[in-house]
Amino acid sequence: MGAETLTVACVYRPGGGFDDSYVYKLRDAFGRHLHVPHRFVCLTNRPLTVDRIPLERRWPGWWSKLELFRAGLFSGPVFYTDLDTVIVSDVTDIATAAYDFACGTNWKGCGTHISSAVMAWDGRTDLSNIYQSFDLAAVERYEQSWERWGDQGWIQDHLNRPFKCLLKRWPNRIVHTKTHVWKGRHATNAPAPKDASIVCFSGRPRPHELPPGNPLLRAWNGEH
């Protein structure tokens, strides 16, 4: 991956059940489980005590993630996860591998639709079309179509290059709560699968809403 320092990135616009603690929890989780020098940075306008990049737009919710692709923002490898991600074991090999652009896809297998919950790319690659071409007028269309859903649908339609599936490259290492941990049931006290390193949430419950003693809540809190 060259001499450039790895950037671990997240995006935070308050709301949707998230507060400042999610940024700190994620930073600390990578600090425990990513064993190479790296820069943890948050795109946000909140006055947090982490390395910050101000958001330029007032795009709602997940649409702020498109600012990750502003021209010149990064100059080396980038590894991104959503805030409601729980790191449960060593992610060094996953985060430091070489990628052009890779991401999650359908959680039940490596399908054809991007999931933007976890992404990795070479920051020297110009992906600015994803950001520059966005117009809020597109929100209604992308929030009504399951075929191309939300920010991830927009990313896929404007990526202008093939993408690789992280789930295929790292089988059983990147998992989803509802699909792989709770297996379609309501939230349970099941732990992460034994080979998992990254557990991605979507919707409710968020990690902080899990009951006391839940294994994923304990992992989110940095408890052994």
Image: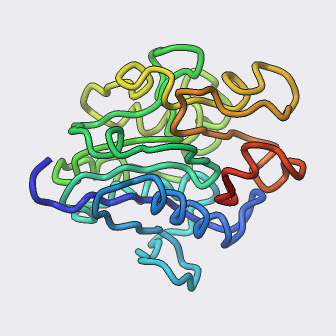
**70 lies above or below 121:** below
In percent of the image, x 71 and y 27: which residue is there?
181
Instruction: Give the answer, above or below, for where 118 lies relative to 162.
Output: below
Residue 136 at x, y percent in the picture: 55, 53
The foreground one among 193 and 152 is: 193
| Residue found at the very far front of the displayed protein | 224
Instruction: Please report the residue visible at 38 percent of the width from the left and 58 percent of the height from the top.
Output: 8
Q: Which of 96 and 75 is in front in this view?
A: 96
Tell me if 201 is positioned left or right of 132 in this view: right
Question: Hey, which quadrant is residue 192 in on the image?
Answer: top right
Kindly give the residue lying farthest to the left in the view shown.
2
Rendered residue at 61%/47% (across/down): 86
Q: In this view, does 138 lie above or below 31?
A: above
**Residue in the image at 61% along x and 39% along y:** 200
Residue 34 location in percent, x, y?
Answer: 39, 53
Q: Residue 8 vs residue 118: left or right?
A: left
Q: In which quarter of the image is residue 169?
A: top left
| Residue 41 vs residue 187, the one in the foreground | 187
